[in-house]
Amino acid sequence: MSTISQTLHEAPRRHPLMVAIAMGAAWLLLYLQLEPLSFALVRALPIDQGGHLAGALQFFFYDTPKVLLLLTGVVFVMGIVHTFISPERTRKLLSGRRSGVGNTMAAALGIVTPFCSCSAVPLFIGFLQAGVPLGITFSFLIAAPLVNEIALAMLAAMFGWKIALLYLSMGLLVAIAAGLLIGALRMENSLEDWVRDLQTSPAAPVTADALDWGGRFASGAEHFREIVGKVWPYIVVGVALGAAIHGYVPENLMASIMGSDSWWSVPAAVGLGVPMYTNAAGVIPIVEALLAKGASLGTALAFMMSVIALSAPEMLILRKVLKPKLIVTFASIVAIGILFVGFVFNHVL
Amino acid sequence: MKHIKVLGSGCKKCKLTTKAIQDRADALDIGIELEKVEDFAQIARYAVMSTPSVVIDEVVVHTGSVPNAATIDGWLQ
């Protein structure tokens, strides 16, 4: 027994490519079996096979493992990607960049750089210390939580790749544009004084740990445990909610309130979203419910973005390094960007 | 006696890190001086970009995650 577990433990280190292929194949096989399995499961139950309950249960049995499996794949791969891109490396790539190119790079790096909102302040300071311009730092800081792999994987699993891609491009657009604007406003004097003084001090070199592939796989597994272990209840509740709506609730219930006809639906969604604080996994079930009840896509996405990108606790943390003027500017610019995204989706697309 | 600081703004992982280090020190019966640094200005002095970070005798040895027991034992011995 111990030799088996030992072999399993050492396998990724010795044959990383083989293990990756085997894991990928197992994942794909499982994924392809989900739909027939869910039908078989519902057929085995003693219920009216053509009824609402059967429809709702089939949706639940298919969607729950599908979303969890997709999330597992994405989170594991991102855990490995994180071992290549440390915040220190991102900072080095961004230091001294011109605005425009720098903002675009910052927003894109925000997707793949490991980021935790509790590290936002040290990261912010670290960027400024290394000579990353303020506007570019903000592009990163907006994109990192807004456009993350969890949000994208869940959007893709629940609403399809098109919506996930739209969310990705709109999120990047908001981050780039807001960072450009904050940079153009030259608000360096609205940093707290102790932060501004730090800018001139040299940053200590931090050596990144050199990892082999075994270590990278371990990082992927650790990321999986951390993320999926935390968000799976949200997913089960979210899909159950979706299943109930799918089976029972009449459509277009919300259309009159959050449909694209009413101009104030987007601002109302953003206004509702700001005081709410949850992660992408928590908000997507709500978005699903909104969409299913007839809210328009722009309104639902604006709501999701405002919940994730703008939150009261984050503002409180940032208050330690930013003066109120800069916080208000930051929040207003991001809010306007989200409003713009909502309106474009509702009226142009 | 080693002076160990855990840098972090009081998030869950920072508390876990502090506890893990204290637990290993107790298990190995090694006396340490453990300090938790939550002030951002103090943290910034060590130029770390992700928390929790571990500083031993003023040298940053670890950033960005909860260290495992083997890593901690390596620091303590």
Image: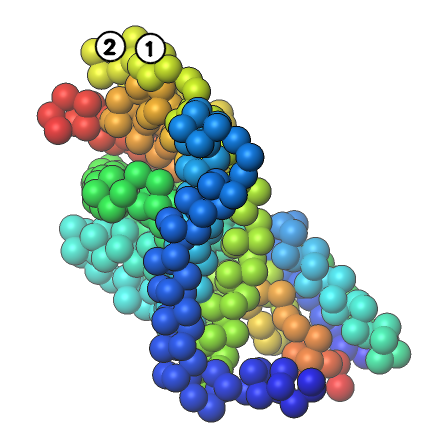
Report in which chain the residue with disc 2 lies.
A
Q: Position of residue A32 (x, y in %)?
A: 35, 58
**Which quadrant is home to the C terminus of chain A?**
top left
Disc marking residue A257: 1
Task: Look at the picture and state if A318 lies above or below B38.
Answer: above
Report in which chain the residue with disc 1 lies.
A
Q: Residue at 16%, 56% (x, y): give it.
A: A101
Q: Residue at 74%, 66% (x, y): give it.
A: B20
Disc marking residue A141: none
Q: Residue at 56%, 60% (x, y): give it.
A: A225
- Secondary structure beneath dot 1 equals helix
Q: Amino acid at mark 1?
A: Ile
Q: Quadrant of residue B17?
A: bottom right
Q: Nearer the viewer, residue A85 or B33?
A: A85
Task: Look at the picture and state if A35 lies above or below B75.
Answer: above
Q: Kindly give the residue lying farthest to the right in the view shown.
A: B29
Read off the residue under disc 2: A262
Q: Nearer the viewer, residue A240 or A344?
A: A240
How many residues crowd mark 1 within 10 Å: few (<14), some (14–19), many (20+)?
A: some
